[in-house]
Image (tube, rainbow, N blue to C red):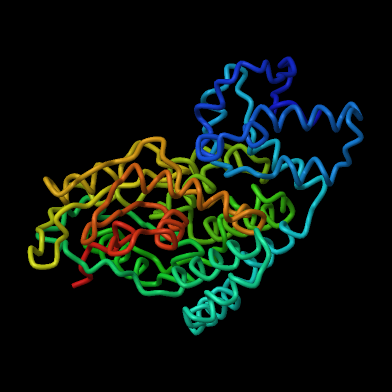
Amino acid sequence: MTLAYHCLHEGERPKECVHCGRCLAACPLFSATNLEELAPRAKFQLARALESGAGGLSAGQVTELASRCLSCGRCEKACPEGLCAPDLIARLRSASPGWQALVWKNWIGRAGLLWPAGGMLAKLVPQALEKALTRVLPAPLDERAGLALHALRAMRAKSPVRPWLRVRRFDPCGKGTKAVLFAGCTAEHARPEWTRTAERLLRGAEYDLAPAPDFGCCGCTLGHAGCKAEQRAAQERNLAAWRAAGRPLLATFCATCRCGLRSYASVDLGWEPFEAEAWMKAVQPLSSLIGETEFSVIEEAAPARVHYHRPCHGAGGGQDEDLLRRMAGQRIGRASRDVCCGLGGVLQVAAPELGARVAADAWNFFAALPGEQVLTGCSGCVLQLASTRPEGVDVGHWLDAVARN
């Protein structure tokens, strides 16, 4: 299999880019920049040039050029050949690891130490110093420094969303079902209140909620960054923890984590007979597990309008949006479908200014006014939108809107 080809099953013919251009309309990065070199088909052309030796490009140069990717996967859905640029980029990064992958590997692997420390340091930087710093740095470092500080502050800050939903009646739909919660990196290291609210909802629905096993990162963004060994280690750790817990229902409230966890079934992790199928059935979004639990609105705390950002990864069957619509009723404003937040994982290290341009498109879509909110069901989307939000607009996970008592 060559780098220019999509992942193939035995007996399939190699698939190559046919230059139809359908990926252009699907790619948020191209839509935000109008730069053809950032489009998915350009990435496949670069990979082909590397394989053929045309243009005198080295593997490192191709990786640098091709790695400007959000890893959202929209191109695969649009491509008639089923080509997936994120898969290609992951293989390029794995074959030629750069400093960006090293930084991301440590950022995820040492999150317990680096995330709180980075957030605290960013919070201590006064605005005057930030402005002075961005003035003296050359482009694009000036913009990148400002974006990095905003991102770190959003990670450390307490959610600005004041709870405005209260459980009125729990649906005991989980009675007798053993479950565990996969909280994910952001909840563990930056937003622990999400975990507490999620646990309350599951217990209220009468699930037999066991203590969280020894889970680690889902591995999704590590794979996109080309850190294949680290991704594999995360997958094996989480599978072992699930087995040790007795293979219970596995609830998650982060769409990216759900996407990453479900991808395990397509990897040879030494599955026992029918175990991969059991894993797929076990991984479920929290929003689908609380049945017909009823909520009431705390009027004095509720926003006039709340918009919904569909997660860039793993939106699944839209369970989060369905739940939010049921909870919020007429307060629901605009709901995105193919709008990307611009996070892009390791792209935040390589070229955060590109992600910021994509985020600007998302904010143009929402057209949110001061006092309104944007809620979502993905940890990464929360942090990216929170760090790029317009003044006076609050951003959070839908769990932030639910009172914990």
* 282, above or below 39, in the image: below
Residue 117 occupies quadrant = bottom right
Residue drawn at point x = 50 percent, y = 66 percent = 151
How many numbered dots are placed on residues in this image? 0
Residue drawn at point x = 53 percent, y = 71 percent = 149
Looking at the rendering, in which quadrant would you find the C terminus?
bottom left
* 48, above or below 359, in the image: above
Looking at the rendering, in which quadrant would you find the N terminus?
top right
Residue drawn at point x = 59 percent, y = 71 percent = 135
Residue 390 occupies quadrant = bottom left
Residue drawn at point x = 17 percent, y = 64 percent = 164
In the image, 53: left or right of 125? right
Residue 351 in sight: yes
* 97, above or below 361, in the image: below
Residue 330 occupies quadrant = top left
In the image, 82: left or right of 91? left
In the image, 144: left or right of 289? right
